[in-house]
Image (cartoon, rainbow, N blue to C red):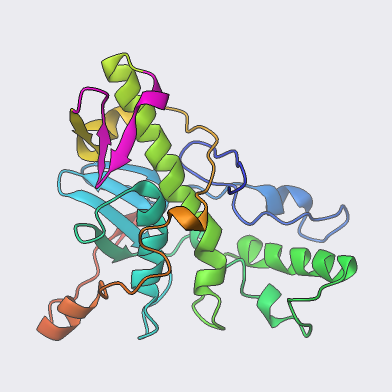
Amino acid sequence: MGRARRITRRAFLVATAAVAGGVGFGVWKAREVPANPLAPDAGVSLNPWLIVDGGGVTVVVPRAEMGQGVRTTLAALVAEELDADFAAIRVIHGPPAQAYFNGALMEAGLPMPNFALSDRQRWIGAQMAALPKVLSLQVTGGSTSTVDAFEKMRLAGATARETFKLAAAARAGADTAQLATENGAVLMPDGTRLTYVELAADAARIEPPEVMLRDPGQWRLLGRALPRTDMAEKVTGSATRRWRCRGWSG
């Protein structure tokens, strides 16, 4: 199974490096939790990668789609753990924000193979991984998009899923162990379905729990061919940008 992680409300402590004292930018800055930049006009944003509103689930992809399929792959990372209906989710590009820093960018550029690292090389890599966060480097390149997003966007989906279950349990007076999730809804013991849309407002008031990432043997989406989420818009010429962050919209 995946590793348990503690997730703070509305933001994640993601890709935090084990930075030793004395580094110029300071340990406190490397460990600072980036704020959630999303401020949807209607609906709820539980974390920087997910919006739930009256229209359903929207996944925020922070890397540029340049034909490499990142808009589809990164959306699938969230949808896999969220138990969302992949065919029904919307995908938008993320706004400029520190929360979307590419933690794999500089680490990937180190002149050493990543399959046989010494302890010292791992330490150096950890320092380099902290720099994009401190510098707010939201960059697409170097084949790092999936490497950077692989855990953090799955955590976004898993944490939201478990928070929706807590909201459903509180509403129905049930135990979360009795609940399941499927296609954007929480399934109650009596068969009732409570959609994420119905639960979003309640979930926004709940402190997210610790979560476990799913074992690859449980994956439904990852590792499989999926329809490109950007294809229809590009073919029809209807592709647009629609997002908003605090203090800036576009």
Q: Residue 54 at what x, y percent from top left?
A: 15, 43
Residue 184 visible at all: yes
Which quadrant of the structure image shows residue 128?
bottom right
Q: Which quadrant: the C terminus?
A: bottom left
**26 sits to left or right of 8:** right
Give the vertical position of 23 relative to 57 (above or below). Answer: below
**Residue in the picture at 50% in, 71% down:** 146
Q: Residue 76 at what x, y percent from top left?
A: 37, 62
Q: Residue 227 at what x, y percent from top left?
A: 25, 74
Question: Foreground: 236 or 84?
Answer: 84
Give the vertical position of 204 relative to 241 (above or below). Answer: above
**102 sits to left or right of 44:** right
The stretch of residues the image draws in magenta is: 175-191
**177 sits to left or right of 173:** right
The residue furthest left is 236
**45 sits to left or right of 10:** left
Is 88 in the magenta?
no
**Residue in the picture at 21% in, 44% down:** 53
Question: Foreground: 3 or 74?
Answer: 3
Residue 250 visible at all: no
Q: Residue 177 at what x, y percent from top left?
A: 42, 25
**Residue in the picture at 56% in, 70% down:** 147
**Residue in the picture at 31% in, 13% down:** 173
Is 184 in the magenta?
yes
Give the vertical position of 74 relative to 244 (above or below). Answer: below
Question: Foreground: 246 or 210?
Answer: 210
